[in-house]
Every structure is written in structure tokens, then in C-alpha cells.
Image (spheres, rainbow, N blue to C red):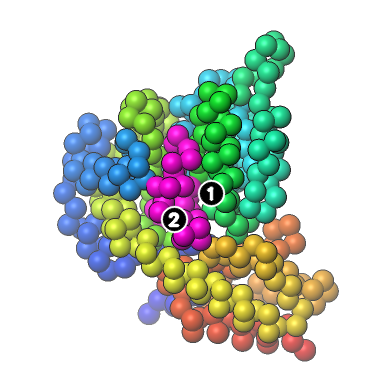
Amino acid sequence: MTKRWIDLRSDTVTLQPEEMKRAMIEAEIGDDVYEDDPATKALEAYAAELLGKDAALFVPSGTFANQLAIMTHTRRGDEIIIGQDAHIQAHEVGAAAALAGVQLKTVPVHLNQIEVLDVRHAIRDLSDVHYPETSLICVENALGNGCVLTLDNMKEIYRLAYLHSIPVHLDGARLFNAALALGVPAKTIAAQADTVNICLSKGLAAPIGSLLVGEKDFIRRARKNRKRMGGGMRQTGYLAAAGLYALTHMVDRLREDHENATYLASRLTEIPGIELMKHRRDINMVFFKIEEGLIKEATFLQKLLSAGIKSNGMEDGEYRFVTHYGIVREDIDTVVEVMKACLVQ
């Protein structure tokens, strides 16, 4: 019998509900490169309507969607403005430079706010021959630090971009978490960008896939770039059926993940030596530090693993636990008791 792990590394580790598997098996399929895969077309149409855009394109991953957007929005040698430590900047292997041939100009992110003045100052003066052209502004919501950008902040950035005729791309890998935290429909956030990436395998439990949504002509051009990037995947209907189930059945249940994260955070405060990052608790992530010298990182991770708990190591001195489909309250209680055994002498 397969061992059941309590996996807190990410909300990408979700396993599929039986109904989603059944939808995959029963999917009507065709060849998506020829644009005749019924399940894929249904997914793309539903996603576009859900986010208030003209069209959508199914792609293998969130990184693929972001890089496809950059490639389609820009020309080689251009510059894009992006928040410091954004996923595109920090966790996509330098793909913007390698694939689209553009450089990144970062601006600070203050918890849940990007100062519009910083963005304005980052826009290049086209009259100066020495400067690259600013051809795209990228924002992320929800942020990887556990916070959510405010809607007003996004509106200010989008208004500034419009005044300078610069498109905005939203990395909305966890857009539905952000929508839940802000108490607004996902399309309200998507309206503050020209193109949006949403991930189906983060929290929504689909096995693979993301969607790039935007204006019809943009998606037409992106489809060609998708082929250039090796993303023409033929019989995608099996995966698209899982994605459609994810969008129609798994979005509302994200509330449970947020509630479990709140419960996890409250229980971690019971443990001496734990410093909780309480100011970054908008979504399904819990960040914390362990008092220096209390336990070695390798020892801590091994003790968790021995108890059937998977966790990533520290990043910038912090640990991150992520709640998701498959994590229940009893799992959280188990994690806390194991941590108490590790840390409380």
C-alpha cells in the first residue's frame, strides 16, 4: 500500500479527485494543433469567459504561459518592468533573456504594494538612443511572498501603462487565491491587465497545464509562438478535461485551503522558537522562521520526513508551508505535534 505523505512543499503536489480522473478518461479528443480538440476548445472558451477576455490558449505550464506572453508582447532587445522577486524574475531560469531576448528592470514590492512612482521612473525615455524600449509591465497576483496586491494598486499601474501605451501581463498563477483574499471575482483582477496566466495545477488539482488569456489577435499570435516553443501538444483533450473540471469544481473549495492555512498559523504560534510572518498571511501560505541555533535545517527536514511530512528547505532564512487539496485539519495537528517534539526540549 502506498504511503500517505503530508506534503507541504507546494500546492502543485495535489492529486486529482476521482471525478476529475473520470472526466479525463471520458474526454472527447482531437488534434489541438489543428484546433479541432473539442475538450481543449471548451476549456479555452470557458476560461476566456471566466476572466472576461476574448480568447485563451492552453499551454503546458505557468512558466510557459508567462514566457509565451513575454515573447508575444515584445521584440528582442526590449525591456520589461517587473516586481522584485516576482516568479518570472526569480524562478523561471532566466527564460525571458534566453527565449525572448529581453532584459528585466525590477522595481521594489512593499508587501502588497508596488509604488506607481517606481514604475513610472522605470519606464525608459524613447528619445534617448541609449535606452532599450519598455514594451511590457509584468505584475503578479497573488505574490509568492504570501501577500496579495490590492486592486487599487493594480488599477493605478494599469492606468499608468495605458497612458504610456505599454501592455500589462498578469502572472495570475494563483489568481483565484488572490480573488478569494480580495473578495472579488477573478475577472475583476484580470481586467487590470491585457493578458493573464492562470495555473490549473496550483491548488486546483489538475495534473498539468496553464492558460494564457487575452485579446483575440494576441492569442492568435501566441498560438504561433506556442508552436515555435514546442508547445503544440496534439491530443490535449485528456488534460484539458481535467482543467475544465478544475475551473468548474475546484475554485470555490480554495476557501478551505485558506482556512487551513489560518489554522496552521495559529497552531504554529504554540511552539516556542517559531517566529511567524503574520504580515504575509493573505492566501494559503504560512511563512515562519526557527530561532537560530535551535535545530539544524537538515536535521529538522529529516525529522519531518521520518514522520511522513515533506517540506522544502529554507529560502532567505524562512520556511514555507502550503495548504492545498489533500491537506486536512488532522494533518496540520500531526505536523504541529511532530514539530513540538523536534523543537521543544
Label 1–label 2 contact, CB within 8 A: yes
For this rendering, which residue is in front, 274 or 9? 274
Q: Earlier in the sequence, mark 1 or mark 2?
A: 1
What residue is at 49 percent from the left and 84 percent from the top? 330
Drawn side of residue 305 relative to residue 294, left or right = left
Question: Which three-letter amino acid code belongs to the residue tagged 2?
Answer: Val
Query: Toward which corner of the image does residue 88 lie, by quadrant?
Result: top right
- Secondary structure under the numbered disc 1 in the rendered image: helix
Residue 109 percent across, percent down from the top left: 68, 46
| 7 drawn magenta | no
Q: Which residues are magenta?
A: 172-201
Circle number at residue 184: 2
Q: Using the image, determine if residue 57 lies above or below residue 326.
A: above
What residue is at 54 percent from the left and 41 percent from the top? 155
Instruction: Assign the N terminus to one quadrant of the image.
Output: bottom left
Circle number at residue 151: 1
For this rendering, which residue is in front, 142 or 101? 142
- Report whether residue 218 is seen: yes
Question: Which three-letter amino acid code belongs to the residue tagged 1?
Answer: Leu
Mark 1: give few (<14), some (14-19) or many (20+) Cα within 10 Å.
some
What residue is at 65 percent from the left and 74 percent from the top? 302
Query: Toward which corner of the image does residue 38 lie, by quadrant?
Result: top left
- Report whether residue 95 is seen: no
Instruction: Assign the C terminus to one quadrant of the image.
Output: bottom right
Circle number at residue 328: none
